[in-house]
Amino acid sequence: MSDAAPILSTLNWRGIAGRALTALVGLGFLYLVWGLYLLGEPLFAVIAFAVGALGVSFFWSAKFYKLRFVYPGIAAVFLFILLPVFYTSAIGFTNFGARNLLSLERVQAYHLSLTETDAGSKRPFGLVIEGEAFRIYLPESGDKPALLTDAIAGTATTAEPHSGEAPETLPVKTAIQNRAMLSELTITTPDGDLTMAGLRDFAASRPAFTLGDNGALTATDGTVMVPDHDVGLYVNEAGETVAPGWRVGVGFDNFTKVLTAEGIRDPIFKVFIWTVVFAFSSMVLTFSFGLGLAVILEWRHMAFKNFYRVMLILPYAVPSFISILVFRGLFNQNFGEINLILSTLFGLSPDWFTSPVLAKVMLLIVNTWLGYPYMMLLAAGFLQAVPRDLYKAAALEGSGGLRNFFSITLPQILPPFVPLLIANFAFNFNNVVLILLLTRGGPDMPGTLVTVGSTDLLGSFTFRLAFQNSGQDFGMAGAISTLIFIVTGLIAYLNFKAMQNYANKKGSGHNG
Amino acid sequence: MVEDKKSLLWRKLLAHGFMIGFIVVIMFPFLMVLSISFREGNFSTGSLFPEHPTLEHWQLALGIPYERANGVIVEPPFPVMLWLWNSIKIGLIASAGILLLSTTSAYAFARMKFRGRGAMLDTLLIIQMFPAALTVIAIYAIFDALGQVVPFLAIDNHPALILTYLSAITLHIWTIKGYFESIDPAIDKAAQIDGATPWQAFRYIFLPISLPILAIIFVLAFIFLVNEYPVASVLLRQTDKMTLAVGARQYLYEQKYLWGDFAAAAILSGLPITVLFLASQKFLISGLSDGGVKG
C-alpha cells in the first residue's frame, strides 16, 4: 500500500516505490487478462480487467485516496462472494454438467484431435539391435523403399533409405517387451511421420474429422456430424448425440424442472420443509438450553460458576468438524458407543442412520450439543443488562422464580436477541457442513429421479447434486442455488430490518 | 427478602445436580473418544478404561509406523500432521490477510465520507449470510481458469484457497468499525494538525489502540477458517494438500472405518484449537455478541 502524495520532501522515494508497485500490479493484471482471453474465458477476462483497472487507478491517483482503504476488501468480497453468487445463478440457466462440461471450441478441438490409422500407409517393421540401442528396419513394401532409422533415443527418430542386405531383426517378443517405448515413438520418413499401429506395423495417422462450415465435422468415411446448439451436443447422421458436449443456455428449463417435474418437485418440497423445521427446531432448542443454563449460572446462590461455565463452553471450543465426526462414530449402529450403552441399559439399538425419523432426531441432538454454548454466552451477556430493580420489586410482590423468568427475564432479553436468532436460523438453514459430515443426507428417499436424502437440507442436497453423485448436474444445482439465494436474501433482509429496528429503539446508530 | 433456608438448600442441590448431570452428558463424547484412542484395533468395543491400553493410534496419528506384538508393522493411514500444518498455515496467512483488509476498510467506513458508504455497509451485512457452500461451483470455475494462466493459483494449490478466504471480512468490518467509532475523534484531529496523513493516523494511532479487538478478530477468523469445509473440499483434492477439516472425513468411510485411528488424530489435532479458544474465550465473547455465528 502506498503512502500519500508527497508533503514534506520533494523527492519522495516511498511515493515513487508505490507508483512502481502499482504499475507492476497493473502489468500483472494485463498478463492475467490476456491469458484468460486466450483461454476462451472472455467474461473472466473482462472482470479481471475491470478489477485491475479500478485498483490501479485508485492507487495511482491521489484523488481516490479514500477508496484505497476499502477497495482491496470490497474487491475480495465482490470476486469471491458476489461474483460466485451471480455466476452460480447464471449456471442455473444452462445445461452445464458432467455431459456438457466444455466450451464449443474445446469440444471441436477434442474431436479434431482424434486420429485414426491410415490403412494405405501401413508397413511392417522389425527391431534391430546395435550395441545397447535399438533401430527400426522397415522392409521394402510395394513401391516404398526399405528404410532404417537412427539409433532410438527419446520419442522421435528419422529413417533413411537403406540399400543392400536387410539387417537381422529381433523376434516380435522384443517388440512386446518394448511396447511402451515404441508406442511413444514417431518415425520421420521421406513419406511423412509414422507411428505404431500394432505390434507388427507402423503407419501414418490422420485426423478422424475435418472441420466444415457451421462447425460440421466430416469423418474420414464421409459421414457428417452437425452441432445441435439446443442441447449442446454433436449429432451424427443416425441421429445419436456424441459426447462430450458443450454448455448452452436452456432458459428456465432447470427451474421448471425443479418446480414441476414429477420425481423432482415432491422430494425438493419435502427437503424444503425439513430445512425449515430443522433450522427452526435448532434455533428453539439451542436458545432454550442456552438461556436455561445461563439463568441457572446467573443465580446468586450458585457456587463454582466459573468451573461450570468452562465445562459448558467446551462443545463450542472443539472444532465442529471434529465433534461432528466423533458423533458419526458414536452413533454408529453396529459398534458405536451410544447403541452399546442403550442396548446394555434398555436393550434398545436404534438404527440412527437408516431410519429417516431417527436420523433427523440424531441431527437435532448433535446440533443442539454444538449450538447451545453460543446461545448461553449471548444470553449471559444480555442477562447482565436486565435491571436488578425489577427482580426486587417482583420479590416484594411475592413472585416466584418461574414467574420472574417469564414476566421479567424473557421480555427483557428477547428484543436484543431477535436479530441473533434470525441469524442463527439463516445459519442453520444453510448448515451444509453438519449434514455432509454426519449423515451425508442419508437415508435416501425411495423412488426419486435425482438422489435425495431424507435428512438433506436444501444446501447439502444441492452440494451433493453438483459434486457427489455420478451425474454431476451443475445446471440444476445452479437453479436450486438461485432459489436458496432468494430465500437467504429475504431472511438476511428481515434480519437487517430487525437490527435497525432494535438500534433505533435503543437510540444508537450501531447494530446489536 | 426472606428466603426459606430449607427450600433454598433443596433448590441449590437441585441446581448443582442438574449442572453436574448435564455436564456428564455433554462430556460423554470427549471421554469416549479419549478411551477409544487407547483401545486396540479399529473396531473393538469395551469399557471406558481399556483393558489393554495401546499407543498404536497415537503413534500412527503422529506419523510414526507402529509395530504390533506379532511383528506386523502398521503404516500411518493418513498424514495427519501434514494436514494440521496445512490448516494452521492457511489459517494464519488468511487470517492475517483478513485482518489487514478488514481494518483498513473499517477505518475508512468509520472515519471517511465517500459516496456509496452507507449502501456498501448495509450490503456487506446482507451478503455475509449467503452460504459459501452453494457458490463452490463458481469458485471452482474461477480458479480452474485462473490456474491455467497463473499456475500459482491453480486448484489444489493453497494460494487459491487463501485468496478465497480473504472474502470472509464482512462481519469483521462491522465489528472493527464499531470499535473505531468509539475512539475519540479529537485524537485524529490532533494528528491531522500535526501533519499526519489519514494512512499515518491509521497506522500509528488507530492500530496500536485497537490491538485487543484485532487480536479477537484474528482468533475468530482463524477458528472459522480452520473449521471451513465446503470450499476447501472442492479446491483441495490431493491427499497431501488437504486441510484437517477435509482430510479428517476420510477416516470414517463405510468401506474403511478407522475409528481408533480417528480418535487419536481428532484429539491430537483438535486440542491446539480448543486450547486457543479456551485461553481467549473471555475476550472472544464480546466479539461474538456483535452478531457472529461460528461455522
Image (cartoon, coloured by chain):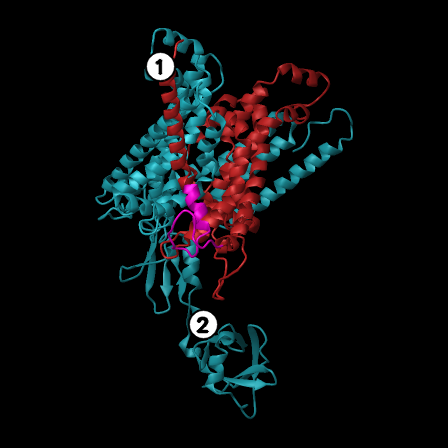
Chain colours: A cyan, B red
First to last magenta residue range: B29-54
Residue displayed at 55% across by 31% down: B280
Q: Is residue A340 above or below residue A410?
A: below
Question: Mark 2 vs mark 1: which is more N-terminal?
Answer: 2
- Residue nearest the observer in this picture, B112 or A166: B112
Give the image location of residue A463, x and y in percent: 37, 44
Q: Position of residue A459 (x, y in %)?
A: 36, 39
Residue A98 belongs to the span the image colors magenta:
no
Which labelled disc corresponds to residue A205? 2
Looking at the image, residue B279 sits to the left or right of residue B46; the answer is right
When the figure is inspected, residue A64 is found, relative to residue A41, above or below; the finding is above
Spatial CA distance of label 2 from label 1 is 89 Å
Residue furthest bottom as drawn: A165
Chain label for disc 1: A
Q: Is residue B141 visible?
A: no
Q: Name the foreground residue: B105 vs A67.
A: B105
Quadrant including the N terminus of chain A: top right
Question: Dot 1: few (<14), some (14–19), or many (≥20) neighbours within 10 Å?
Answer: some
Amino acid type shown at disc 1: Asn
Q: Amino acid at mark 2?
A: Ser
Dot 2 falls on which chain? Answer: A
Q: Nearer the viewer, mark 2 or mark 1?
A: 1
Residue A198 in which image quadrant = bottom left
Residue where numbered disc 1 is placed: A404
Instruction: Judge whether A439 appears above or below A492 on screen.
Output: below
Q: Position of residue A196 (x, y in %)?
A: 47, 76
Q: Is residue B100 left or right of residue B13?
A: right
